[in-house]
Image: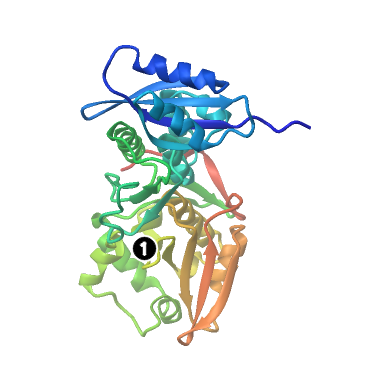
Amino acid sequence: MEPTPKTWRLRVELDDSPGALARITTRLADRDCNVLALSVIPVPGGVLDELVVRGGDPDLLPADLVAAVRAEGGRCVGITRADVRDLVDAPTAALRAAGHAVRDPGTLCDALRAVLAADSVVAVPDSGVEDPGENSARLVARDGTVVVARRGWAPFTQVELARARALLDLLAGGGVVAPQPTALVTGDGMAVVLRPGRTGDEDAVAALHARCSMGTLFNRYHAGVRTVPRRWLHRLLSPPRGTTVVAHCADRVIALGQLIPMSTPDSAEVSLLVEDAWQGRGVGTALLGALVRTARAAGYAELVGWCLPAETGLVRTAARAGLVASTRREDGLHRVSISATGAGIARPGVRESASQQIASG
């Protein structure tokens, strides 16, 4: 079997003179190269020409292409292996990536990687990389989500970064990363709504704690708590850089869950509090599912919960949600690690109403 010809993606700087690009393509043709795609990228002071080239000679090396560009007075600012996906023009790729991210918020980093033709895109804490370097970019969405993109073969252009920021704005404006209000019906027919917590819920959350038993509160806070100090309520509902989801039935908040970033960029701490009368009815399972979807949208791979050694509620809730969880002993507590990646989230005992997504307020 003959070797498969190699396809390369080049970015070339040329003098602003008539026929410069034509001379480059002629030189490449002399090396038995076929130009499959060509695009022009505006940059300060001129343009970059991006070419996707397939060599007829399977032994053609990147250095041969660079030499051909230099022979015509050009400068190759980046070269990397390419495949058929690189034949899709940039606007089409951006639209497809945006569509995927809207349908599945957990693909945000994948969408940005496609838009930027990046080697990697990862979510980081907002105190993370300040100056990622020439071949990296730090992007901040309107909701505070921070991502760092890296590409070894060529620096990012301002046009590419503008496309990425537009995608982040689109998704943040559509509420992709924030948890969406969801109407559910428990197995015994009770209607429950999951939605983001807000400052107006302070009295309802205080009442939730007052209705919880000492054992339930101890399992949540690992301390003897009977009432919640007023100063706690704001942080419970608006944790710094975190997310709170409340479950309410009629005018009562019956459960509360939090997702708070940890020091490691791919992990977030998760905690649940479910009123005693609502335990075992699928509310905690649905609440954990909502938090996992939010974690996926933010780019987290792991949720971490801290439990007393005798408390197995979080592990059982993760199992009912169809999530993979593992535990280990750490500092006198059990560290429960829940994978935020993988298969979909099951919700046994709880079914979504026909109008699954409802408007805020």
Q: Residue at point 26% right, 19% down?
A: 16
Identify residue type, mark 1.
Pro
Q: Residue at point 63% right, 28% down?
A: 57
Q: In what element is the residue under mark 1?
A: strand
Task: Name the outermost residue toward the top.
Answer: 18
Where residue 123 appears, as percent x and y from the top left, is 39, 53
Task: Name the outermost residue toward the right.
Answer: 1
Left or right of 361: which side holds 278? right
Which quadrant does the C terminus fall into? top left
Q: Residues within 10 Å of mark 1 (few under 14, many from 20)?
A: many
Picture mark count: 1
Whether 268 is drawn above or below 116: the answer is below
Where residue 176 appears, as percent x and y from the top left, is 39, 42
Where residue 115 appears, as percent x and y from the top left, is 42, 35
Task: Name the outermost residue toward the bottom.
Answer: 332
Task: Name the outermost residue toward the front.
Answer: 71
Q: Residue at point 35% right, 58% down?
A: 244
Whether 42 is drawn above or below 296: the answer is above
Left or right of 261: which side holds 353? right
Q: Which residue is mark 1?
A: 261
Most foreground residue, 72 or 212: 72
Where residue 327 appears, as percent x and y from the top left, is 57, 75
Most foreground residue, 4 or 291: 4
